């Protein structure tokens, strides 16, 4: 079996995440307004909720990563907005069907980077290739861990 080729992609934050964040905030505000909480507490909780939404929006809408790559040997490289490349390692990943891949990487200095790849910010072929390699890599790690324990 031949080794898998490197996978590289440009990255920009997904608009879907912002839309989901706003939708959940509206539902939380609606639930708060319909609750039996005293009015002064409602106002205070609403302000805390809005501050949290603004903080999360800023965090996810301004990514310092403009591109990422996964080499044949399994190493990750992040291209930062300043043009420099940083090595990174994959800590975890999540997949939601065939449409969404969420990568959790760690760059030097223990800096955590989350990349959400969705239909609005990535190519379907890239996501398909990533899903296939991530599954194979995770099965390989579980298989190796099982042999080393015995």
Image (cartoon, helix red, strand yellow):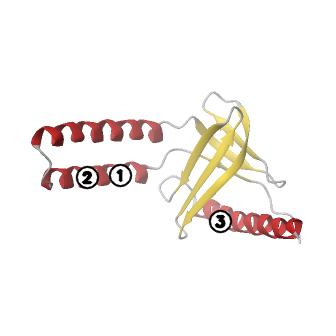
Image location (x, y in percent) of residue 96: 52, 66
Which mark is in front, 3 or 2?
2
Disc 2 marks which residue? 28
Image location (x, y in percent) of residue 7: 72, 55
Image quarter in which the C terminus is found: bottom right
Disc 3 marks which residue? 131
Q: Which residue is pictured at 38% across the width and 48% down the height?
A: 18
Q: Which residue is pictured at 17% across the width and 43% down the height?
A: 42
Residue nearest the viewer, comparing 33 with 101? 33
The answer to whether mark 3 and mark 2 are in CB contact below 8 A is: no
Direction from residue 127 to residue 5 in the image, left or right: right
Residue nearest the viewer, comparing 145 with 24? 145
Q: Which residue is pictured at 67% across the width and 51% down the height?
A: 91
Image location (x, y in percent) of residue 90: 70, 50
Give the class, few, some or many, for how many residues have Cα within 10 Å of label 2's Cα (few <14, many ≥20).
some
Residue 113 against residue 17 in the figure, above or below: above
Disc 1 marks which residue? 19
In the picture, the disc for residue 116 is none
> How much space separates mark 3 and mark 2, taking CA atoms?
33 Å
Q: Earlier in the sequence, mark 3 or mark 2?
A: 2
Image quarter in which the N terminus is found: bottom right
Give the class, few, some or many, for how many residues have Cα within 10 Å of label 1's Cα (few <14, many ≥20).
few
Give the class, few, some or many, for how many residues have Cα within 10 Å of label 3's Cα (few <14, many ≥20).
many
Q: Quadrant of residue 6?
A: bottom right
Image location (x, y in percent) of residue 98: 55, 69
> How much space separates mark 1 and mark 2, taking CA atoms?
14 Å
**What kind of element bears circle 1?**
helix
**What kind of element bears circle 2?**
helix
């Amino acid at each position: 079996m031949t080794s898998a080729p490197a996978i590289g992609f440009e990255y920009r934050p997904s608009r879907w995440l912002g839309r989901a964040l706003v939708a959940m905030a509206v539902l939380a505000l609606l639930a708060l307004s319909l609750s039996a909480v005293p009015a002064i507490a409602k106002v205070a909780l609403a302000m805390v909720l809005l501050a949290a939404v603004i903080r999360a929006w800023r965090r996810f809408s301004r990514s310092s990563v403009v591109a990422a790559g996964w080499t044949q040997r399994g190493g990750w490289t992040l291209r930062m907005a300043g043009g420099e490349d940083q090595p990174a390692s994959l800590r975890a990943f999540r997949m939601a069907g065939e449409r969404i891949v969420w990568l959790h990487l760690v760059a030097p200095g223990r800096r955590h980077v989350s990349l959400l790849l969705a239909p609005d910010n990535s190519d379907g072929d890239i996501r398909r290739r990533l899903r296939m390699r991530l599954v194979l890599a995770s099965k390989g790690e579980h298989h190796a861990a099982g042999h080393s324990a015995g």
